[in-house]
Image (cartoon, rainbow, N blue to C red):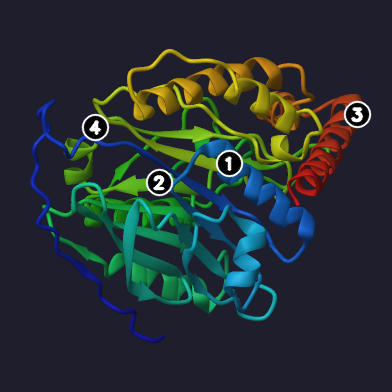
Amino acid sequence: MAAAPTLVFMDNTINDNSPNNSFNRSWNILNWNIRGINSEDKCNVVKEKIDESACAIYCIQETKRDHFDHTFIKKLAPKCFNKFAFSPSVGNSRGILMGWNSSLFNGDIIESNKFSITIKFSSLHNGHHWFLTSVYGPCQGPDRDDFVLWLNNLQIDDTVNWMIMGDFNFYRSLSDRNKSGGNINDIMIFNEIISNLGLLEIPLKGRKYTWSNMQDDPLLEQIDWVFTSANWISVYPDTLLLPLARPTSDHIPCKIQIGTNIPKAQVFRFENYWADHPEFMELVKSVWSANVRASNSATRISSKFKLLRAALKKWSKKLSNLSRLIKICSSKLEVLDSLEEQRPLFIQEYNFRNILKAHILRLHGYKKRILE
């Protein structure tokens, strides 16, 4: 067995949680084993989940793709995600992709191997830095032994701010399965590694399992995990792991929400397809030509933008909102996935879930055509 590399992390982040410290910021990370990303439908769904999660960084496992370029990334993610790193697939298995918004973070690749990608991120807001590792652990064979050795040999400094996430293909207890027959030896190995590394689990809120074999009487397991260093929790105490609806793949996508003490202001969201609507330009012209009382040009422009924002909000409520329809369908899909964790789905529920998935994919296609 080949020796696994040893990865040592050092971090000089100042641990200051005072309300006035500019360190207090928030961002989200999307984590998902997509089970192959070579179809247009998969790209559309990933792009929608990036948008839904409002993430600054996305981590995709099991891409089953040996190469990525900027042309492909443009199909997969919004334009602001113009930086990425990947570990290529081997044949028709494995593969990891990590992308990020370069207007928020600088990213330096620390290590890339067949099991993981590790990137040191530096905030463009305040210069603070932290480490993120996206993992895909093989489920069997010699590669699984190599993965265990690599993971166990990680060395993490006590002061590091570090997160490791992904599909480990391990569960921590028999309760992480909905059926009997779990592997006690694997459980002991995984928990021993977590203990040796001093990692802390970020628990999944609202769901028990992250994977399903998608059968009529499914096997359900939690094999996707998010762990952090102890120092992370003291610096980012409001870190949450939240499930999202699963429109495709046998793994659920998850959003890691890294909270701060700064309340998030309401953001006005401009939908790109509005500009193609026949009423859009007429509305903009009518609002912009309205008389505004102002003492100078800057105030006048600011007032016009406020009026335009209010008018667009009111006007947009009359439109068919594809994003809202996708969200409604996704919420119903999540209810069915959650119900499956409690009992096998009835045949009507099972069929309805398949109909929902197909409908969500169609809606993604409609939205893509609108935005083109």
As displayed, is residue 91 above or below residue 130? below
* Three-letter amino acid code at the position of disc 3: Ile
* Three-letter amino acid code at the position of disc 4: Pro
- The residue singled out by tag 4 in the image is 237
Query: x, y percentage for residue 189?
Result: 38, 58
| Residue reaching furthest to the bottom | 2
Q: Nearer the viewer, mark 3 or mark 2?
A: 2
Name the residue located 32 percent from the left edge and 31 percent from the top edge.
259
Query: Which numbered disc, 1 or 4, marks the residue that appears first in the sequence?
Result: 1
In-image side of 135 versus 32 (left or right): left
- The residue singled out by tag 1 in the image is 51
Question: Cα distance, mark 4 to mark 2?
Answer: 14 Å
As displayed, is residue 300 above or below residue 255? above
Q: Nearer the viewer, mark 1 or mark 2?
A: 1
- The residue singled out by tag 3 in the image is 347
Res 201 seen here: yes
